Image: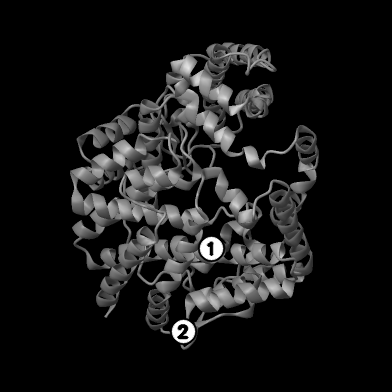
């Protein structure tokens, strides 16, 4: 497949397009399903006020909600993927909007259920389980509702919190509008004399550029722009911290962090263990920065030198057929069953491979219960695309196993573990490439690529997590936060994480203003924990073989959300309640750094 120009969708061979007909053979069937889902919403609303009447009534409600969930998921996937394959198609724009309406209708229809279940005495619920054995399927679902009982307020107070919800999201919405629509960065002049506008989209590309003066110009252009708006952004962010603190207090949580981690029943010690483990291994990051300074040949290493590759880009050209073969070889340690699912995905209409006119950008995997997963790619014949194929196939196989082994109630896995299977696949691919590459230049490139994954995902996201921890704690304690105080917190963290060989430029103090994830409190740490768990699993799979694979597949990939995330991972052999998986991942980083230093000496 050598033709890489942007084509019309109809000009791409069917073998490189996903088969949405596996969801619905015709659009008419989809329309019929939408009407059926609306009928089910009406039927569900008829259960309001009756869930405590009998075990059978509660069981019938859960079964009907499961049926609605199954149908709504298929409606949503078909509509959005039809739209994503050609976003200019007005018909499927309408389908996507209609699917959103179905989801809103469904959520509204079942909104009475959790408060009503909480109102049923626990002894009555226990008698229901004894009276109706089939209700045991939903026991965990009910227990998850009961778990939040102490944080659920009276109906009147819940109504007030619901009504102020629109005010609560105002800081995030204001920031999003400012950062995506209003902020304008300056133009810069490249080596050829062209004037180019700096944007969010091209910023990292500029930070990868070999031209150091260009990197410096872009770096200062971006962060000096944030500095001009610094007091305003700080005021918006402090408002967001305060609204989070308000909700935590109202819901009787000891802190905002406790509130957010409770959603997956994640012990707060997991968060602290992550930061402590990374602190313990900061000397390795400092050594990496010293090596970066040496290899770049600069007298002073600056923050705008962080992203430029240390190795010559010799990644080569990979056709999609070559990528499939590489990924399958890399995943061979996963065993025949896993590989058979991967092969089915690669040949069975799961993947939409190539870019076409108006196709959605990026990549994702999406699965509706009862059908196979789908993968959207925009394959570019480069190494990054090979890694993306491995990554998305990890998501897809995870969904395949969960959907095959769990009822719809427990099939969806939670965010805390969402990136584990995908990143584990990437680690296995990286290992295979390094072990089998004969070209030393390519080995150096691959090792640099892997080290950067550790720096950006494990170290950097932990630094973000530590910044969040500090500013939320200060808000909880009633301390006043300003632009200057938050800049200093962020500056000191950069000094701590990057070490004595890094000049921590004053402009980087404003970087926290560029991170939208901070408006989604206590989210970013999961990138670091998920990465650590994935590396730990890949090492176990490579060293222990079939026993590790069997535990990983049966106890984790098949688990969905049938247990809390920490319990699923522990059953598979990685106990995230201890610092060990993070420390083990950091030892892998240190070993890679040792090898990289020898390569570059």
State the image coordinates of residue 452 (x, y, percent, origin top left): 41, 65
Q: Residue at x 60, y 55 (%)?
A: 257
State the image coordinates of residue 433 (x, y, percent, origin top left): 25, 56
Q: Which circle marks residue 501 in the picture?
A: 2
Q: Which of marks 1 and 2 is nearer the N terminus?
A: 1
Quarter of image, res 124: top right
Rendered position, 280 above or below 299: above
Q: Where does label 1 land, which residue?
A: 204
Q: Which residue is drawn at 58% across and 55% down?
A: 522
Q: How far apart are marks 1 and 2 (CA)?
A: 22 Å
Query: Which SS class for mark 1?
Result: helix
State the image coordinates of residue 525 (x, y, percent, origin top left): 51, 57
Rendered position, 434 above or below 374: below
Q: Residue at x 19, y 62 (%)?
A: 438
Rendered position, 41 above or below 458: above
Can you say which quadrant of the picture contains the N terminus?
Answer: top left
Q: Nearer the viewer, mark 1 or mark 2?
A: 2
Quick check: 68 left or right of 441?
Answer: right
Q: State the residue in front, 78 or 586.
A: 586
Q: Residues within 10 Å of mark 1 (few under 14, many from 20)?
A: some
Q: Which residue is drawn at 75% across and 37% down?
A: 158
Quick check: 410 left or right of 183?
Answer: left
State the image coordinates of residue 283 (x, y, percent, origin top left): 40, 78
């Amino acid at each position: 497949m050598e033709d890489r120009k942007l084509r019309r969708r109809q000009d791409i061979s069917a073998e490189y397009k996903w088969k949405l007909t596996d969801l619905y053979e015709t659009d008419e069937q989809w329309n019929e399903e939408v009407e059926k889902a609306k009928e089910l919403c009406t039927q569900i609303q008829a259960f309001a006020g009756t869930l405590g009447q009998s075990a059978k009534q509660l069981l019938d409600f859960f079964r009907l909600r499961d049926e609605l969930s199954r149908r709504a998921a298929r409606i949503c996937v078909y509509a959005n993927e039809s739209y994503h394959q050609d976003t200019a198609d007005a018909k499927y724009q309408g389908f996507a909007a209609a699917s959103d309406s179905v989801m809103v209708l469904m959520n509204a229809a079942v909104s009475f259920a959790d408060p009503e279940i909480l109102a049923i005495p626990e002894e009555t619920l226990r008698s229901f389980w004894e009276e109706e054995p089939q209700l045991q399927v939903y026991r965990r679902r009910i227990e998850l509702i009961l778990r939040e009982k102490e944080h659920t307020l009276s109906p009147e107070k819940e109504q007030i919190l619901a009504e102020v919800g629109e005010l609560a999201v105002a800081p995030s919405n204001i920031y999003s509008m400012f950062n995506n629509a209003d902020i304008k960065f300056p133009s810069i002049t490249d080596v050829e004399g062209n004037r180019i506008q700096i944007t969010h989209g091209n910023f990292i590309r500029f930070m990868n550029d070999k031209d150091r003066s260009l990197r410096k110009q872009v770096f200062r252009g971006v962060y000096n722009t944030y500095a001009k708006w610094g007091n305003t952004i700080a005021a918006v962010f402090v408002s967001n911290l305060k609204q989070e603190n308000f909700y935590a207090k109202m819901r009787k949580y000891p802190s905002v962090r406790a509130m957010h981690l409770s959603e997956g029943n994640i012990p707060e010690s997991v968060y602290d263990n992550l930061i402590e483990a990374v602190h313990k291994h900061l000397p390795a990051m400092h050594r990496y920065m010293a090596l970066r300074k040496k290899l770049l040949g600069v007298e002073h290493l600056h923050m705008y030198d962080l992203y430029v590759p240390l190795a010559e880009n010799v990644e080569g050209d990979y056709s999609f057929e070559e990528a499939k073969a590489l990924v399958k070889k890399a995943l061979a340690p996963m065993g025949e069953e896993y590989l058979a699912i991967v092969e089915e995905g690669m040949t069975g209409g799961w993947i939409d491979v190539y870019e076409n006119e108006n196709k959605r950008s990026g990549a994702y995997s999406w699965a509706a219960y009862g059908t196979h997963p789908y993968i959207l790619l925009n394959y570019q014949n480069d190494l990054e695309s090979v890694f993306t194929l491995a990554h998305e196939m990890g998501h897809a196989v995870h969904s395949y196993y969960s959907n095959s082994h769990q009822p719809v109630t427990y099939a969806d896995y939670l965010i805390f573990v969402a990136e584990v299977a995908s990143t584990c696949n990437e680690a296995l691919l990286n290992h295979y490439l390094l072990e089998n590459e004969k070209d030393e230049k390519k080995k150096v490139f691959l090792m640099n690529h892997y080290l950067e994954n550790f720096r950006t995902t494990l170290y950097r996201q932990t630094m973000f997590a530590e910044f969040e921890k500090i500013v939320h704690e200060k808000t909880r304690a009633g301390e006043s936060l300003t632009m200057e105080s938050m800049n200093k917190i962020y500056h000191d963290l950069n000094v701590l994480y990057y070490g004595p060989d890094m000049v921590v430029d004053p402009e980087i103090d404003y970087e926290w203003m560029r991170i939208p994830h901070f408006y989604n409190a206590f989210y970013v740490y999961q990138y670091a924990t998920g990465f650590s768990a994935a590396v730990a699993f890949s090492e176990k799979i490579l060293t222990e073989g079939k026993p590790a694979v069997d535990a990983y597949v049966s106890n984790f990939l098949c688990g969905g959300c049938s247990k809390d995330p920490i319990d699923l991972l522990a059953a598979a052999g990685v106990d995230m309640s201890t610092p060990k998986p993070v420390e083990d991942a950091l030892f892998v980083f240190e070993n890679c750094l040792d090898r990289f230093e020898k390569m570059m000496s």
